[in-house]
Image (tube, rainbow, N blue to C red):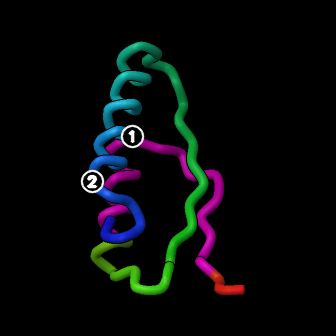
Amino acid sequence: MGDVMDVSKAKFYVSLINKIKRDIPDATLRTSLIVGFPGETDEDFYELYDFLKEYNLKKDIIEEYMQK
């Protein structure tokens, strides 16, 4: 996830997701995302996409980054 999320944060979230799914099998995890940050590559985007699919996260909101 390049500059947007470092590896240590990603590992923390994966660990947390796995713990929740283990302890509460029927839990539904949801997230809101912003994509299209300056410098974000297609590879970054698809890494996030694969992460969402792998962990079966429900997407509430996916917005494109807009500089103000």
Residue 23, position as x, y percentages in the image: 41, 13
Taking the magenta stretch, the answer to whether it contains residue 64 is yes
- Name which residue lies at 38% across and 72% down: 45
Circle 1 is placed at which residue position?
13
* CA–CA distance in space, label 1 to label 2: 10 Å
Residue lying farthest to the top in this orientation: 23
Q: Is residue 37 above or below residue 47?
A: below
Q: Amino acid at mark 2?
A: Val
- Name which residue lies at 52% across and 24% down: 27
**Label 1: which secondary element:** helix
Residue 68, position as x, y percentages in the image: 72, 86
- Name which residue lies at 33% across and 80% down: 42
Of marks 1 and 2, the one in the foreground: 2
Numbered marks: total: 2
Indicate left or right for 5 with 58 as reference.
Answer: left
Q: Amino acid at mark 1?
A: Tyr
Q: Which corner quadrant of the image does residue 25 belong to?
A: top left
- Name the quarter where the N terminus is drawn: bottom left
Residue lying farthest to the right in this orientation: 68
Q: Which corner quadrant of the image does residue 49 belong to?
A: bottom left
Q: Is residue 34 above or below residue 37?
A: above
Q: Which corner quadrant of the image does residue 41 belong to?
A: bottom left
Residue 19, position as x, y percentages in the image: 37, 22
Judging depth in this view, the residue of 66 and 21 nearest the camera is: 66
Indicate left or right for 32 with 17 as reference.
Answer: right
Using a 10 Å C-alpha cutoff, classify the residue at mark 1 as few (fewer than 14 neighbours), some (14 to 19) or many (20 or more): few
Answer with mark 1 or mark 2, whichever residue precedes in sequence.
2
**Label 2: which secondary element:** helix
Circle 2 is placed at which residue position?
7
Taking the magenta stretch, the answer to whether it contains residue 38 is no
- Report the magenta residues as a range: 46-65
